[in-house]
Amino acid sequence: ASTYHSMATVLTAQGRYDRAMDLYETCLAIRLDTLGPGHPSVASTYHNMALVLKKQGQYDRATELHEKYLAIQLGTLIPGHPSVANTNRNMASVLKAQGQYDRAMELY
């Protein structure tokens, strides 16, 4: 799973988003099967997938994966952890790109 994840990050940097998403999907399936749905490594995969989806303009799906990422974070991190704030910022940027300014402001 880690190898697929690493390869997908390289493809993302190259702008090869469709292929990156294929590898993230493979990584996610392995991680869900071996680690379970609440594991931080699953959350990391959701996060990176959401970033790619935002770059592709697939805002609804990106928001959905950011929400899954946030749910795992809230279950595993202490309240007020900086990573939660970063996830809220990422979600807000997707909402802003969609023109949902009020919702974005709430998260910022």
Image: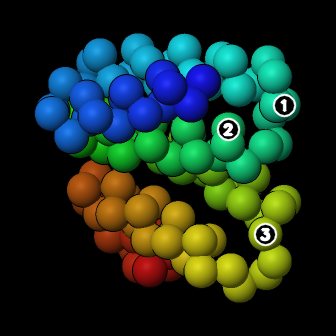
For label 3, the residue is 77
Q: Position of residue 83 (x, y in %)?
A: 59, 71
Q: Is residue 13 visible?
A: yes
Q: How far apart in space, not on screen, are marks 2 and 1 (Cα)?
A: 8 Å
Q: Which is nearer the N-term, disc 2 or disc 1?
A: 1
Q: Amino acid under label 3?
A: Leu
Q: Mark 1 sits on what residue?
A: 36
Residue 77: horizontal and vertical position, in percent?
78, 69
Name the disc covering residue 42, or none: 2
- Relative side of 100 to 39, left or right: left
Picture quadrant where residue 92 is located = bottom left
Pinpoint residue 41: horizontal percent, then vertical percent.
67, 42
Q: In this view of the protein, can residue 100 be seen by the observer?
A: no
Q: Which residue is found at the position 50% from the left and 72% from the top? A: 86
Q: Residues within 10 Å of mark 1 (few under 14, many from 20)?
A: few
The spot of residue 16 in percent (x, y) is 19, 24
> Residue 26 appears in which quarter of the rendering?
top right
